[in-house]
Amino acid sequence: MKLHADTRRILGKRDRMIYGHFIEHFHRQIYGGVYDPGNPLSDEDGLRTDVLEAMRRIHLPVLRWPGGCFVSSYHWKDAVGEKRIPSYDKAWRVEEPNTFGTDEYVAMCRKAGCEPYICTNAGTGTAEEMSDWVEYCNLESEGQYAKWRIANGHREPHKVKYWSIGNENYGFWEIGAKSTDEWGRLVAESAKMIKHVDPTVELSAAALADIDWNVQLLKNSGQFLDWISIHGYWDPIHETNDCADYDACMVYTNDIDSSVVKVRGLLSAMGLDKKIKIAFDEWNLRGWYHPNVHSIVQGVTKEEYLYPRDKNDDNTLYTMADAVFSACFLNMCNRFCDIVGMASFAPIVNTRGCIYTHKEGIVLRSTYHVFDLYVNYLGDTVLDSWNEEMPLKALKSRKGDPVDVELLDVVVTSFSDRKGYAVAAVNKDGCCARKLTLDMEAEGDVSIHYISGDSTEAYNDIGHEGVQILHEKLGAFSRGMEVELKPHSVNIIQIGVEE
């Protein structure tokens, strides 16, 4: 394929928050994940130092918490102060000890170097409870909740800037699900109270690519919102854990931007596209495995609904399919950088996360290396580019139907703080290398940083590293230069980039 790029034409500057992540009180994400008191690898606050270091290595920009479905019956006041009150988590049907709460979460974010992003309980919660949470975090000393924070040992405000009202409250599976009319009014009243507490916070609200839901939401509360939250899981295996094969995952990439296009169109139609950005604050190729919970007929025994969640820990599931899909998603966010300002890979630790923990250390799954590449090697300024002779291949979808898929996904960037260019080039072809011809004005030495593995099924596990970042020098750049992209690979090609 021949890639053309106009290095003088800037499409936009991506926000670093598109490389954000998410963590929820589900399975081993918190307890035994980021928070593991007593483990020799944990610090004085019970936080895993190896996980924190891995977060810092990919310059984690923002971390959404505490849910997710968990938050829709979560009462934050049970999880601050000396007396922690265990509760029954009605979303995931386990006891929540509440030993990891707001103060522990904010401390973790500060140590990881990221912004906290709190999702509030709009299921069983109230507008007042949400605004009380903002009082606790952000007021200096006024009122009982700021004073409570101070009494808990945190004299300075936590200064949490990003807040979301609710999580998937449109869905029947969500505790406290709402109708479109109910949602518009609840968000308006909650946003009003939150802004009365701290007018400087930025607010999001749960939405999806649905006209009726979003029109009512935005008509009632668009004046208060800075973000609109959408979610996406393409391989719906919550009940089966039966992962789609590599080719079917590549078919999913055809639909990777559909929600953004629809929501953007509605924002534009309502004159809000310059005020409200999209926060794609839960996304992953595959849905989390949690059978017999978000269904009408519930599992009765723990063997039916709880213990199967351990199968999320099977590291052989997280292959180059996950990595290539994730790179295509990040390319989409870069292309839509004028409207997508935040995204959160779900989750960051365990379950389908890019970091897996065990008692003696961590495993960096294939998706972790995608974030490493994009954060540390790709530019922040998106340039105009187009292609000739895009290779196509008919691949079988999950249903077995042949679907034409474009095999290369490419974004061209420059850097706002140094010279040079960086091209994100994804080869979706599972069996063949592909040539990329670079038709652009540039000069300097060329290097390529990539992941591929020895097959589409390559994975990382304890004592097994099938996916890692490799680096090659390709010599001096000349216009029309050809670069070979290995099969099932994610590549960042740097041209004349200053160290």
Image (cartoon, helix red, strand yellow):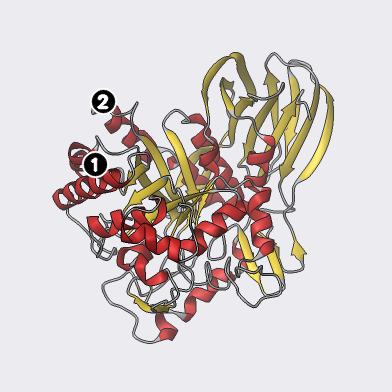
Local packing at callout 1 (Cα closer than 10 Å; few below 14, some 14-19, many 20+) is: many
Local packing at callout 2 (Cα closer than 10 Å; few below 14, some 14-19, many 20+) is: few
Disc assigned to residue 214 = 1
Return the disc, 2 or 1, that comes first in the chain's sequence. Answer: 1
Amino acid found under the numbered disc labelled 2: Gly
Circles 2 and 1: CB distance less than 8 Å? Answer: no
| Rendered view: 339 above or below 470 | above
* Element on which disc 2 rests: loop
Left or right for 418, reference 108: right
Name the residue tied to disc 2: 271
Residue 73 drawn at (x, y percent)? 31, 68
Query: Which image quarter: residue 472?
Result: top right
| Rendered view: 190 above or below 27 | above
CA distance separating discs 2 and 1: 13 Å
Residue 457 can be seen in this image: no
Q: Tell me which residue sits at (26%, 72%) in the image.
A: 296
Amino acid found under the numbered disc labelled 1: Asn
Q: Residue furthest left?
A: 181
Which one is nearer the viewer's eye here, 473 or 108? Answer: 108
* Element on which disc 1 rests: helix
Left or right for 464, reference 392: right
Q: Residue furthest bottom?
A: 301
Which one is nearer the viewer's eye here, 96 or 245? Answer: 96
Residue 174 can be seen in this image: yes
